[in-house]
Image: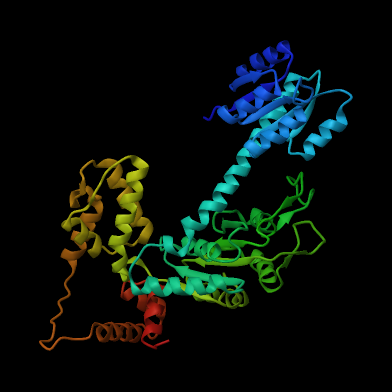
Amino acid sequence: MRRYKILVVDDEHLIRWSLEQNLKKQGYEIISCGSGEEALRLVQEETPDLMLLDIQLPGISGVEVLERAKEIDEDLIVIMVTAIGVLETAVNAMRLGAYDYINKPFNLDELAIVIKKSLETQDLKREVAHLRTNQPKQFNIDSIVGESDDLKRILNMVYKIAQSDAGTVLIQGESGTGKELIAKAIHYESGRADQPFVAINCAAVPETLLESELMGHEKGAFTDARTQKKGLFEIADGGTVFLDEIGDMPLSIQAKLLRVLEDRVFRRVGGTKDIHVDVRIVSATNKDLLTSISEKTFRNDLYYRLQVIPILLTPLRERRADILPLARTFIEGFNKEFGKDVKGLSPQAEAFLLGYDWPGNVRELRNVIERAIILESDEIMQLEHLPSEMISKTTMTESSSSLTFNLPSEGIDIEDVERELINQALAATDGNQSKAARKLNLGIDAFRYRMKKFKLL
């Protein structure tokens, strides 16, 4: 845990000694001095986190020390210590950048609270500044790794969406394909990048709480509503709300979400006032929403309102050109995290990764690499370093397959084979797309992507 450094500036030795002893017991590192000139030297050389500064000092006044110290370190927290009767000077010090002031004779418990609060506030400001500086780099389009044509097509679409005024985006794809990563790229490549990005998993929040989380609530709206609370739409005003697993959103909330999508207006739970917001709403699901509509678990009108700009993320097994670049990126990242020095993958390990079907997609690949980095210490990641259950499962699948294909001597266009398999699967299931997809061991989104590709949809 970080140990904060506090500079105590007071010309009375007894006060300095008392503060030093008390603050050291609270775990702070303390330096002290009795003049403004010495205080400025210590600010320059010791870079304290906080300064307790007496207003009435011999030589340079406390207010002048405040001004000059802020020129040296604008992030320095300054709490003025004042005698009763100089309130006007203390207020002026606040205008010049002091965080707070406390009167002599001061209560040590009260002072401890002011110091703790000021340090927590400063830490929060630094964290927000860090996130605003680094998150756009961490989550922009350039941070998304891959070389497949499919991924390039998706990223081109993401960039166009980000630069547009599109207020509603729907991302569909299997679990682990990177839907939240794409949502963040849309946000951080857009003009909203310096505004909040807030996310909620609609499947993880109980129905009774989901409306309150999204819309907020008024004090007394229900039993535990002891204070007013802003919802995510209000918090994200000017930015982006990411609704993950929207296919699991209860019907009762779907109707209220529809109004937000149409008018960007809502009311807090228990409220009577309309609240207008400017938010981009990005939703994601791994469900077949058309099937959900037929099962009456998802609203037809909401689906078409969400479907303004759809993005379909293809599974990793359909963009195998991305597997090795992703694996190398994960190796590099986990090397740094765990202090390892894995140089790369053996040819056998690479061949296995390329041939594996990755039912868990990018998330599964990441977990496999992380596990191998943690458990193994060789410079080259070997096939035997990969999870044995993956290897045995693949071996069983291969040995149980009885399919044999004879390649014509003149060759064949693989897309002709794929189109014919899609047609045969549809014919065998009387056009039922979900059943046809299962016959080919494809997710419904991947199956529909192929139907569109071959103009069968």
Left or right of 221 in this view: 49: left
Left or right of 271 in this view: 232: left
Find residue 280 and report its image quarter. bottom right
Q: Is 375 or 32 nearer to us in this picture? A: 32
Q: In this view, which residue lies farthest toward the left?
A: 409
Find residue 65 and report its image quarter. top right
Q: Which of the colour schemes (rainbow, by chain, secondary structure, one colour) is used? A: rainbow
Q: Residue at x 13, y 81 (%)?
A: 406
Quadrant housing the C terminus: bottom left
Q: Is residue 243 above or below residue 306?
A: above
Q: Is 442 or 92 nearer to us in this picture? A: 92
Q: Residue at x 20, y 43 (%)?
A: 378
Provide residue 4's location: percent of width, then percent of height.
58, 28
Q: In this view, which residue lies farthest toward the top?
A: 14
Q: Residue at x 52, y 57 (%)?
A: 136
Residue 229 at least partly seen? yes
Q: Residue at x 60, y 58 (%)?
A: 194
Provide residue 298's location: percent of width, then percent of height.
57, 71
Count of numbered tags: 0
Find residue 89 and report its image quarter. top right
Q: Is 175 or 170 nearer to us in this picture? A: 170
Q: Is residue 429 above or below residue 151?
A: below
Provide residue 217's location: percent of width, then percent of height.
74, 53
Provide residue 237's location: percent of width, then percent of height.
68, 60
Residue 47 at least partly seen? no
Q: Is residue 407 above or below residue 365?
A: below
Left or right of 330 in this view: 298: right
Q: Is residue 406 above or below residue 13?
A: below
Q: In this view, which residue lies farthest toward the right?
A: 85
